[in-house]
């Protein structure tokens, strides 16, 4: 049994939306009723939400809406009993088992006690409570909250129905017009009172005899006014408020129907609930940031791939002797090696690349001239190239432009058809 609390709220629900709802706040420590009342219907549950804010809440459901039964357990099915139970009851139930919530109350060696209730009723009760912002610890059939007796039934009348408890996990709710027939059927099949030993002393205490009854007689311990003409011996117990009686029996009761898909979530989820929207917003933001980063990385990879492709194209154009490029480091190494080979210069002299960069502007201004071949002599400090142009004046024009940076010597120019060819020798000015 759970640790006792100072106060708790008990609510008796109904499967009818327009039926009254009784409630009571009970204090186990003070052993008294703190507050109680009756609501017009389920839609008014919010009126007692304040009582539920700081107290545990137990919900009672009418026994007439719950089938409490005992079933035989097939050999070898104990481990999968929870899954097997609906099919063990299938032939006894008029409804499809998929529409029913089957809860295992207790299990013996060969039998099991079960509670069966329609899913739509459980869902309706939980929705009404949730709409009123009331969270419950347990959902318990009301008849099982009556006191338990070893030698008979316990009974109490509430709102025109009789709540009856037969054993720890078996009970029922019956309308008064059907109560006599039900008791007679029960007495003929399972007499609860046990007669005294045949050889017991005749002078045995008469009070005990009256309590236990005679052989085959049903004993009913009643907490409200007993109806007339009922089978069995009705023993009047100290009268109490029925809701108080049920509240005393519900705390820590094992017959909690909140199992399976209705099982209560851990307490920490309750405290995380207000942050759910924040978590969703943060998740969306994170997804957007990750998406943008992925797109950025993809764009950069595409750009890097384009740069690699262009560098390989230039490499093959400049160094066609290399057919294979195993890696980018190999490409850089070969390009640097070729640049070093072409660019090494003596003291006081510019390297080949420097010469080429200086003559390029002049060649660009005389596009009619094209260089056929070029020779660079580092030791003599000169560059010689063979060129072809459209006319003699083009060579003179090029010579004038180059003389700004070099000493220029034009070789013999000769015309071949419509073209003029000749050699140009360049030396650095001292």
Image (cartoon, rainbow, N blue to C red):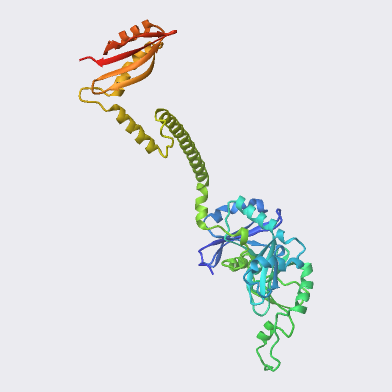
Q: Judge from the rendering whether residue 47 lies leftward or rightward of residue 400; answer left or right.
A: right
The residue under the point 70% across, 72% down is: 71
Question: Which of 213 and 417 lies nearest the eye of the viewer?
Answer: 417
Rendered position, 110 above or below 416: below
Q: Is residue 101 visible?
A: yes
Q: Judge from the rendering whether residue 420 lies leftward or rightward of residue 173; answer left or right.
A: left
Provide residue 337's location: percent of width, then percent of height.
32, 33
Residue 232, quarter of the rendered image: bottom right
Which quadrant of the rendered structure holds the N terminus?
bottom right
Rendered position, 376 above or below 172: above
The residue under the point 50% across, 47% down is: 275
Question: Which of 377 and 197 lies nearest the eye of the viewer?
Answer: 377
Q: Residue furthest top?
A: 393
Provide residue 108's location: percent of width, then percent of height.
63, 76
Residue 381, quarter of the rendered image: top left
Q: Is residue 164 visible?
A: no
Which quadrant of the rendered structure holds the C terminus?
top left
Q: Judge from the rendering whether residue 206 lies leftward or rightward of residue 352; answer left or right.
A: right
Number of dots carrying numbers: 0
Residue 251, quarter of the rendered image: bottom right
Provide residue 183's location: percent of width, then percent of height.
76, 74
Provide residue 150's location: percent of width, then percent of height.
64, 79
């Amino acid at each position: 049994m759970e640790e006792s609390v100072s106060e708790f709220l008990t609510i008796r629900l109904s499967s009818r939306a327009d039926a009254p709802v009784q409630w009571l706040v009970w204090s186990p420590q003070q052993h008294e009723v703190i507050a109680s009342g009756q609501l017009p219907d389920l839609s008014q549950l919010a009126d007692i939400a304040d009582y539920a804010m700081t107290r545990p809440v137990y919900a009672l459901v009418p026994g007439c809406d719950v089938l409490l039964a005992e079933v035989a357990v097939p050999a070898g099915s104990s481990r999968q009993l929870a899954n097997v139970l609906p099919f063990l009851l299938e032939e006894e139930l008029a409804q499809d088992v998929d529409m029913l919530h089957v809860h295992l109350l207790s299990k013996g060696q060969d039998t099991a006690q079960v509670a069966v209730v329609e899913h739509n009723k459980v869902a309706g009760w939980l929705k009404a409570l949730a709409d009123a912002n009331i969270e419950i610890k347990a959902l318990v059939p009301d008849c099982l909250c009556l006191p338990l007796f070893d030698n008979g039934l316990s009974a109490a009348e509430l709102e025109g129905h009789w709540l009856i408890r037969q054993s720890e996990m078996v009970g029922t709710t019956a309308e008064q017009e059907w109560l006599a027939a039900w008791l007679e059927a029960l007495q003929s099949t399972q007499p609860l009172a046990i007669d005294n030993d045949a050889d017991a002393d005749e002078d045995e205490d008469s009070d005990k005899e009256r309590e236990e009854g005679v052989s085959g007689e049903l004993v009913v311990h009643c907490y409200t006014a007993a109806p007339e003409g009922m089978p069995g011996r009705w023993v009047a117990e100290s009268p109490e408020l029925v809701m108080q009686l049920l509240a005393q029996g519900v705390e820590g009761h094992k017959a909690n129907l909140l199992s399976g898909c209705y099982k209560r979530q851990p307490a920490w989820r309750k405290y995380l609930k207000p942050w759910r929207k924040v978590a969703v917003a943060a998740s969306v933001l994170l997804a957007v940031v990750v998406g943008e980063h992925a797109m950025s990385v993809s764009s950069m990879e595409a750009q890097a791939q384009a740069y690699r492709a262009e560098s390989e194209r230039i490499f093959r154009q400049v160094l066609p002797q290399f057919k294979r490029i195993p890696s980018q480091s190999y490409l850089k190494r070969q390009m640097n090696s070729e640049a070093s080979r072409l660019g090494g210069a003596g003291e006081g002299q510019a390297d080949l690349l420097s010469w080429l960069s200086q003559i390029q502007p002049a060649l660009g201004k005389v596009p009619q001239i094209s260089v056929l071949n070029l020779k660079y002599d580092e030791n003599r400090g000169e560059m010689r190239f063979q060129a072809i142009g459209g006319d003699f004046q083009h060579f003179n024009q090029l010579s004038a432009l180059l003389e700004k940076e070099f000493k220029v010597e034009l070789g013999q120019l000769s015309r071949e058809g419509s073209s003029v060819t000749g050699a140009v020798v360049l030396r650095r000015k001292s």
